[in-house]
Image (cartoon, coloured by chain):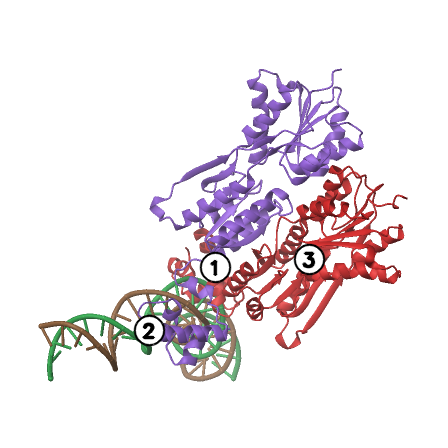
Chain colours: A red, B purple, C green, D brown
Amino acid sequence: MVTTKDIAKKLGFSVSTVGRALADDARISEQTKLAVRAAAEELGYVGNLAARMMRGGSSNLIGLILPDIQNDFFASIAQALSESCDRQGYRIVLSITGDDPETEVRHIRDFVGARVSGIILVPSAGLKRESMALLRQVPHVQLLRYATGPDDLWFGIDDSDAMERATAHLLDLGHRHIAYVAASERLSTGRRRLEGVHNAYRKRGIAPSSLATFLDTPTSTWGERAVHEMLTLPEPPTAILSGSAHVTMGIIVALRRAQIAVPDQMSVVGFGDPNWCEWWQPPITAIRPPIQSLAVNCALWFMDRLRTPEEKLVKSYHATSSSELILRGSTGAPASR
Amino acid sequence: MVTTKDIAKKLGFSVSTVGRALADDARISEQTKLAVRAAAEELGYVGNLAARMMRGGSSNLIGLILPDIQNDFFASIAQALSESCDRQGYRIVLSITGDDPETEVRHIRDFVGARVSGIILVPSAGLKRESMALLRQVPHVQLLRYATGPDDLWFGIDDSDAMERATAHLLDLGHRHIAYVAASERLSTGRRRLEGVHNAYRKRGIAPSSLATFLDTPTSTWGERAVHEMLTLPEPPTAILSGSAHVTMGIIVALRRAQIAVPDQMSVVGFGDPNWCEWWQPPITAIRPPIQSLAVNCALWFMDRLRTPEEKLVKSYHATSSSELILRGSTGAPASR
DNA sequence: GAAATTAATGCTATCGATTGCATAAATACA
DNA sequence: TGTATTTATGCAATCGATAGCATTAATTTC
């Protein structure tokens, strides 16, 4: 590959002069700069980032750790982050962990090895001590999920509030037998969302005894299975709260297979609002988290932090944004029995 | 950050010894190795990739260029590629171009600057000369879309064959007035798919005069608009071929709004088979491209190529995999008039 | 017991870009 | 005309890991 040395040799200059010309140093004559730029262009010179980094420079790389990129939720985040970072010259190194803590450590280690400027992560459920130790070496911020151990910096959704409003909606419609199908409590988001469900009950003075929870992995398969299970209950629910879009899909498909009419026999509220929620028949009432703005805010804040001198850095920062509850056709009053 | 020098100082060894101990060099005594490893662990040493790269080493980074990560199609590719590469120790640097050639050049330039080991790209419609020149400096392979200019290495779907079969399915059902809604011919995939449609007509000796094509950007909005337009034709189609999943979504939503029954009044075949195709009512007949295996094959082939000595490299390689046509409920014989 | 071999480690140059400190030439000022 | 100043450039060290070539000590061989 072409180096400054090649350019220097071609023009009879020293590497210093070439380097300065390319950096537009004031000391270099215009004539020389033009010659150097022309030669660089001609030879197809592209500066070696590794060499630049060696001299204390930073890497313009930001590590992004996500559990899954096929999930619409995370894909939107990747898109928004990528755009925001791009605008400031940062590139994204992608790590897809599949929620596997081992993979997560490996990738974090590589990020540190590559001396990325920072790491934005959606931590896996079982974030390892080792990962935390590695993270301590690099500026980082947590997104969506929150794990104690790394720096206390977090951008997320007010999961509790969102879920509380969804639950309130169902309770206010008169539902008393509600099923909650979601991710296990191993994730911070799982815990918060369940908390929100309970809050809604508590604030209305309704005993949560009639709440049936189905907690496992947030997949459509789990949504389907949960529906089958809840239908065998002595007193089946009249409404379902879903904790994730994949689960919602599983639920509504299973309901249709079981020929249960939505919303007449069963109301459904989903967390997460992919396009098909609007297009489904009936359109699905759903919580729409502000993913886009969340990701953009996080990116801007984080990149600003990367430029902030050490002594001015805040130790702790939590930013929560609140979601919208989009009322559509999948919720209604319970059928009278 | 901790360097080999720090470890050396702590233990009273030279950096060479530390380096060799970490590299498990045979000349170093077991005792020393243990001491060095322990110290490295304790200090939280992570080798500096940049420094390693300076000495002719390669970067374990692979650049991935995609038009859009929110598209299910590309997200699956990213996932599969990421997993395959991970298994061989490669990390993915992500570039989302939004099909903008300017963004594409910038990202490719940065990839070259970062001395990535290779680039896997889905080229944008207007891949610039500058991009091609930069690509010439790095091993690369094209995925899905094919552009002349970069190396003649390509992994893709047999778009023509797939579309031909979908068209044949409709023709064989008796449809003669067919609408084809897809991406413009600026993309290689767009051209090939249209080619396939024509092939089906030709092989059956049917004049393609009754084929109405609606070519633009492959979005759901375009799908909706195209439906509105085709319904105003003097002789509206009895079947629609869609060139992308997004378009399919737009089409079926528009049809439902217009209260046109599928498949009784209108048959629909989509290119691309996201989950909801199966779950929609009626389930959508769709072409399922082997994205997963395509991505995995591409990744394995490419990483193997990265290890191949220069003189043994093939100059040209095209791999096409064929798609499946999944027959579901959205296609049927045309209504008799 | 002297020479030869092996084992364990150190010294130093290298990769490419950057930068402080010379140096050389050209111009300005007294 | 000689010194100060500006302008344009070169030299050499630096960043961290690696690898060829010493070097030293320990052990084996004849």
Vertical position of residue A11 compared to residue C9: above or below = above
Q: Chain of mark 1?
A: A
Q: Amino acid at mark 1?
A: Gly
Q: What element does badge 1 sit on?
A: loop
Question: Which mark, by number, is residue A35?
Answer: none
- Marks 1 and 2 sit apart, C-alpha to C-alpha, by 40 Å
The residue furthest front is A234
Q: Are marks 2 and 3 on the same chain?
A: no
1 or 3: tag closer to the N-terminus: 1
- Give the mark toward the camera: 1 or 2: 2
Which residue is pictured at 48% across the width and 59% down the height? A47
Residue placed under numbered mark 1 in the picture: A47
Residue placed under numbered mark 2 in the picture: B29
Vertical position of residue B196 compared to residue A146: above or below = above
Q: Chain of mark 2?
A: B
Residue B12 in picture, x, y percent from top left = 39, 81
Residue B150 vs residue B269, the one in the foreground: B269
Q: Within 10 Å of the Cα at label 3, are there few (<14), some (14-19), or many (20+) other Cα atoms?
A: some
- Marks 2 and 3 sit apart, C-alpha to C-alpha, by 49 Å
Quadrant, the N terminus of chain A: bottom left
Quadrant, the C terminus of chain A: top right
Q: Amino acid at mark 2?
A: Ser
Vertical position of residue B272 compared to residue D11: above or below = above
Residue C10 in picture, x, y percent from top left = 33, 78
Q: Are marks 1 and 3 on the same chain?
A: yes
Q: Amino acid at mark 3?
A: Ser
Residue A202 in picture, x, y percent from top left = 85, 62
Q: Within 10 Å of the Cα at label 1, are there few (<14), some (14-19), or many (20+) other Cα atoms?
A: many
Residue placed under numbered mark 3 in the picture: A184
